[in-house]
Amino acid sequence: MSEPRQQQADDQAQPLVSHLMELRNRLLRCVLAIVVVFLGLFYFANDIYYFVSEPLRTLLPEGTSMIATEVASPFLTPFKLTLVTSIVVAMPIILYQLWGFIAPGLYQSERQFAIPLLLSTIVLFYAGLAFAYYVVFPLVFGFFSGVGPEGISYTPDIARFLDITLKLFFAFGIAFEIPIATLLLIWAGITTPQALAEKRPYIVVGCFIVGMLLTPPDIISQALLAIPMWALFEIGVFFGRFIGSKQFAASKS
């Protein structure tokens, strides 16, 4: 009796081991992709920082510039930015590896839904970064550079600037994924478009709370995050109605 049970346990363990090995291999590919991109971008680390900091530098008073208050900041700050940039650039490869890991466990209909969802995730993430850089940064940094007391020289530290910048990039990149999250909740049957619409007042308040927590303490950046989050939520609910109707029709047929 012990031998069949042992054989059954071994058969159950083999798929788990194979899944773990596949997960390890795909994670290694993700890390390798990031390293390759980083090695290609590291030579341009200062240029990348120059580009990212341009919305702030153009607003600095004449005769002033950004400063480095720590000994290693001139090296570590562009290094950190280049590493984060490498992850962002390699994001399609990372998501492709994630898709390759979960795709075998999906039905054909689920794959047809997941592929455009995956592509939309990449596009929306990059759209969030672009919105932060071209729309939010000029307004936020213009506000910061114009509210200082008279006689105070505005010379931002390069490391502190990068911290705020990455925080804003992360906040807007994630916020622009709200339609995807909404569609997934509806598609999985966790909620319905009607239920989400009924909770709209709470969603609006939640958007402004998230904007307050994820952005610098000024009303401009908070509103610039909260309002697009609300709009993206409405987009997700709108398209979720079509998903819900299709599932309902499929269940009836």
Image (cartoon, grey):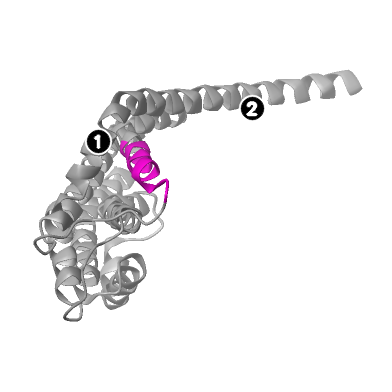
Q: Where is residue 183 drawn, in percent x and y?
A: 29, 51
Camera-nearest residue between 97 and 46: 46
Residue 63 is one of the magenta-drawn residues: no
* 180 lies above or below 82: below
How crowded pointer 1 is (Cα within 10 Å; few <14, some 14-19, many 20+) is rated as: few
Q: Residue at x 36, y 54 (%)?
A: 185
Magenta region's main secondary structure?
helix
Q: Which residue is mark 1?
A: 119
- Secondary element under disc 1, as helix, strand or loop, is helix
- Please state the extent of the stretch shown in magenta in the rendering: 71-85
Question: Do the residues under discs 2 and 1 have CB atoms within 8 angstroms?
Answer: no
Q: Which residue is mark 2?
A: 16
Residue 55, picture quadrant: bottom left
**Quick one: quadrant of the C terminus?**
top left
Q: Residue at x 53, y 27 (%)?
A: 23
- Secondary element under disc 2, as helix, strand or loop, is helix
Q: CA distance from mark 2 to mark 1?
A: 29 Å
Q: Amino acid at mark 2?
A: Leu
Residue 78 is one of the magenta-drawn residues: yes
